[in-house]
Image: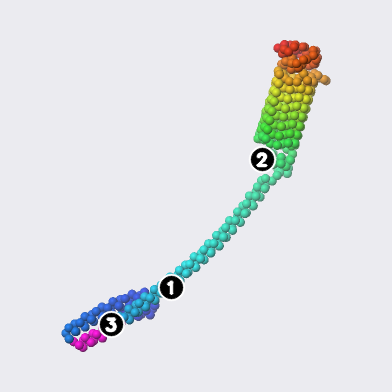
């Protein structure tokens, strides 16, 4: 029965089952061979020759069949191992092929993804560049910017030599900005910081600088006719040769400012502090310096004809002896505090200047005060 099953299994090609069944068959043959040998030994003991011969033949047959079975088992095992090896080799080759294909696919996908990323990056860069160009596009006209621009927009407009006239530039930090020869007619700079700014030669007619900070700013040769510069910080600012005709600088701080050669006809300096200011060669006809601080101010060769200097502080004023105080209208110094030397210099001639008609009296070097009637009296 076992041999029949082994043959059937071998016929079906199931080598593993064949090997197992052949092993079982070999065990069976071994057991039967052992039993045959025992029977042969027993027959030999009793001297039964016929039985011994039969047992010997049977034993020889069992041995032959066992050898054949063992050969078949070895062949089946070798075939099975070969087939397993071939199967493993085939599977390994297939796995390696799949791995190679996967690597190629991964590489292609990676290359495609990299190309996609690069394309997306180039697209984003192009968009960013376009956005930057759009943002930084220089304005061509006043309509391209808001009604109240920022400092950056002001700088862009300056690079385009734009016309700022009428714009609102109040409450801005414009310190150090270069406005050289810019068109700024009627611009509102109220409360802005223009300290250290360069406004040299700028057209600032009717501009408003109320409460602005122009400390150290350069406004030389600028046009400031009718401008409003009240209550502003103008310390150390330069207005040299500027035209400030009719400008209002009341309550402003002009200490050590430079106003030499400037046009100040009809300008208002009421309650302003001009301590140490340089007004040499300035044209101050008809200007108002009421209650102003003029300590150490230099008026050398200035024209003060018709200037109103009532109640101003003239102690230590410089160059007033060289200034022009008369003409079509004399300067009004009523109530002003001054020294004789400030009016006449070191070696005056008696009655050498006319401030109010018949108002001056020679008091040596002592300080005097001009009364409301134009008479100077010792202080």
Q: Residue furthest right?
A: 328
If the image is split into quadrants, where does the C terminus sit?
Answer: top right
If the image is split into quadrants, where does the N terminus sit?
Answer: bottom left
Q: Residue furthest bottom?
A: 50
Mark nearer the viewer, 2 or 3: 3
The residues tagged by marks 1 and 3 sit, at their Cα atoms, a distance apart of 35 Å
Q: Is residue 198 above or below residue 108?
A: above
Q: Is residue 253 above or below residue 142?
A: above
Q: Position of residue 339 (x, y in %)?
A: 72, 15
Total numbered labels = 3
Please tell me whether mark 3 sits on a helix, a strand or a loop. Answer: helix
Q: Is residue 91 above or below residue 173?
A: below
Q: Looking at the rendering, which quadrant does residue 369 occupy?
A: top right
Closer to the chain start, of discs 2 and 3, is: 3
At 39% from the left and 73% from the top, the residue drawn is 81
Q: Which residue is mark 1?
A: 86
The disc label shown at residue 152, or none: 2
The residues tagged by marks 2 and 1 sit, at their Cα atoms, a distance apart of 79 Å
Closer to the chain start, of discs 2 and 1, is: 1
Please tell me whether mark 1 sits on a helix, a strand or a loop. Answer: helix
Please tell me whether mark 2 sits on a helix, a strand or a loop. Answer: helix
Q: Which residues are magenta?
A: 48-65
Q: Is residue 166 visible?
A: no
Q: Is residue 52 above or below residue 372?
A: below
Q: Is residue 297 magenta?
A: no
Q: Position of residue 358 (x, y in %)?
A: 80, 12
Q: Which residue is mark 3?
A: 62
């Amino acid at each position: 029965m076992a041999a029949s099953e082994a043959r059937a299994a071998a016929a079906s090609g199931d080598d593993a089952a064949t090997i197992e069944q052949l092993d079982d068959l070999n065990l069976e043959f071994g057991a039967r061979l052992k039993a045959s040998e025992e029977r042969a030994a027993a027959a030999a003991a009793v001297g039964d020759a016929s039985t011994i011969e039969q047992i010997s033949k049977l034993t020889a047959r069992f041995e032959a069949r066992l050898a054949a079975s063992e050969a078949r088992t070895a062949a089946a095992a070798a075939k099975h191992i070969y087939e397993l090896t071939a199967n493993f080799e085939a599977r390994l080759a297939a796995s390696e092929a799949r791995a190679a294909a996967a690597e190629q696919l991964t590489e292609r996908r990676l290359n495609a993804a990299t190309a996609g990323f690069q394309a997306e990056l180039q697209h984003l860069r192009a968009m960013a560049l376009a956005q930057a160009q759009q943002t930084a596009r220089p304005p061509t006209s006043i309509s391209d910017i808001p009604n109240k621009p920022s400092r950056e927009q002001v700088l862009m407009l300056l690079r385009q030599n734009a016309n700022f006239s009428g714009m609102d530039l109040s409450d801005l930090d414009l310190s150090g900005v270069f406005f050289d020869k810019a068109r700024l007619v009627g611009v509102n700079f109220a409360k802005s910081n223009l300290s250290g700014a360069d406004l040299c030669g700028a057209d600032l007619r009717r501009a408003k600088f109320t409460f602005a900070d122009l400390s150290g700013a350069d406004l030389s040769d600028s046009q400031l006719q009718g401008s409003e510069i009240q209550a502003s910080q103008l310390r150390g600012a330069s207005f040299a040769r500027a035209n400030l005709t009719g400008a209002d600088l009341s309550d402003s701080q002009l200490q050590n400012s430079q106003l030499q050669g400037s046009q100040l006809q009809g300008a208002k300096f009421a309650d302003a502090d001009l301590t140490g200011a340089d007004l040499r060669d300035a044209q101050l006809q008809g200007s108002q310096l009421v209650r102003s601080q003029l300590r150490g101010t230099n008026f050398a060769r200035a024209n003060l004809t018709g200037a109103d200097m009532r109640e101003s502080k003239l102690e230590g004023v410089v160059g007033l002896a060289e200034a022009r105080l008369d003409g079509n209208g004399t300067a009004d110094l009523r109530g002003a505090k001054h020294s004789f030397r400030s009016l006449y210099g070191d070696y005056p001639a008696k009655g050498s200047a006319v401030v109010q008609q018949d108002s001056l009296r020679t008091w040596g070097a002592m300080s005097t005060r001009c009364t409301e009637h134009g008479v100077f009296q010792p202080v």
